[in-house]
Amino acid sequence: MLGRIFKAYDVRGTYPDLLNEGLAWQIGYGASKYLLSDAAAGGETSPMMKNIVVGRDMRASSPGLTKALIKGISDQGGNVIDIGMVDTSMIYFAVNHLDCAGGIMVTASHNPPNYNGFKVSKRKAKPVGEATGLGEIRKQAAMVDKATMVPAHGRIEQRDLWQAYNKHVRGFLDIKGKKLKIVIDGSNGMAGTMIPKVFGKESPLGAYPGLEIIPINFENTKNVFVHEPNPLVAANMKWTQEAVLKHKADAGFCYDGDADRCMAVDEKGKIVGCDLLTGLLAKHFLDKEPGSAIAYDLRSTKAVAEEITKHGGKPIRGRVGHVFMKQALADSGAVFGGELSGHFYFRDNFNADSGAIAMCTILTVLAHSSKTLSELIKPIARYSQSGEINFSIEDKDGAIAAVKEFYGPGSEYQGAIDELDGVTIDCFSKPGDHGGWWANIRKSNTEPLLRLNLEAKDKKTLDKMLAEIGPKLGHQVEH
């Protein structure tokens, strides 16, 4: 059973058939053993390094799973600091704020309500994936026998960190005394708790001055989603788009289930691509810290690297996924990073991602400009993009090899090839009929799918290359 719920970057499955309280206890035990030993191996001797932060989302199964998880941690010998129902980014904050051995968030992020899972972080809130500890946690969880083990009875305490978290998140927001009206779709997830507690009247610091928030889908106690809590799916954005137009708001934001990422909508009700936001926010950070590095997901528009270079920064092209993006920030010392999926990373947030801080930064840029969000984005949206398109095919490796041969060195296209993540074919600067485009093709880790992102200098070239490359990758599917 454990093998079916341990994924590349987290633990996730349907409740209670694949994930239940018994398995939660085992995973708590295994995670505690790994996190405490990792802290010790890193030379950490502080008493706080026996502490593990635990938080949960709003799902009906989360309280029971959290209780069992905490018991497993405690029985192994770890001390637990339970911070209650929070957004995932608050776990990253808490691990660093309290200087703990790690943290575990009970959540299934954007999945439907019958799912749940665990996101594990180690000291400094570094991500734990299959190759960076999750495999060891699975091994320890599988080995423990609850019937014969002797509980160590680690300490368990509850702690309220909302005031400290408020100060941290609000430190990224400065609207210069202006008034901004924004729509926020909480997707019936953790934004419905986090937004009022950080920016609204429920905040320990009081409502943020000048910020008018129009909340939609904030109810999160009934385990019912008005729409799937995944803002990457365009159909889930219509509530935000319609509300922005209805209320004549300056911008709109739609959060995912655990509120660690969000998508933005401009004042015209148009969804703003996250790579375009990365290009926009890059200038903000480079104005504050000239010459800094900015990391970005390799699927992003070429305009991102161009904007970073234009404003005197150093572009850092990274692999897809939070494990790789956080590592890219750490390795390069980048001040900021953005991913196409809606995750935005901040050096001053422990290199971790935060939906709330991303929103704060966008609003700060908007408040410091005389332009609307659509006007700020327009010059960055200078190329034509396909978005991510999925193709069903059994022989993924064969299709990629064929595409490389057809478009790469030695072909009439003479495209540049790199394999940082999947395969990227770059003919952007090539002259004539064969130039003016680039594409990235990546394999799904779990399905017989290839994922294509293609960009061109104009719509005509984009359509031409989609019609040419698409059939080589299999049958296009909605995903």
Image: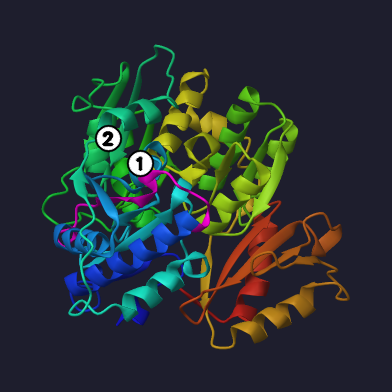
What's the distance in space between the residues labelled 1 and 2, CA to CA?
Answer: 8 Å
Q: Is residue 49 left or right of residue 309?
A: left
Q: Which residue is mark 1?
A: 94
Q: Element under label 1?
A: helix
**Dots 1 and 2: beta carbons under 8 Å?**
yes
Q: Is residue 260 left or right of residue 443?
A: left
Residue 311, given in percent of the width and then of the height, sits at 71, 30
Dividing the picture into quadrants, the one containing residue 139 is: bottom left
Q: Is residue 13 left or right of residue 420?
A: left
Instruction: Inspect the magenta stretch and tell me whether residue 367 lies in it.
Output: no
Looking at the picture, the colour scheme in use is: rainbow
The amino acid marked with disc number 1 is Ala
Residue 248, given in percent of the width and then of the height, sits at 32, 28
Q: Is residue 127 visible?
A: no
Crowd class of label 2 (few under 14; some 14 to 19; many from 20; radius 10 Å)? some
Residue 11, given in percent of the width and then of the height, sits at 35, 68
**Residue in the picture at 19% in, 62% down:** 71
Crowd class of label 1 (few under 14; some 14 to 19; many from 20; radius 10 Å)? many
The amino acid marked with disc number 2 is Leu
**Residue in the picture at 20% in, 76% down:** 146
State which tag comes first along the sequence, 1 or 2: 1
The quarter in which the C terminus is drawn is bottom left
* Span shown in magenta: 41-62
Q: Element under label 2?
A: loop
**Residue in the picture at 20% in, 54% down:** 226
Is 469 drawn above or below residue 369 in the view shown?
below
The quarter in which the N terminus is drawn is bottom left
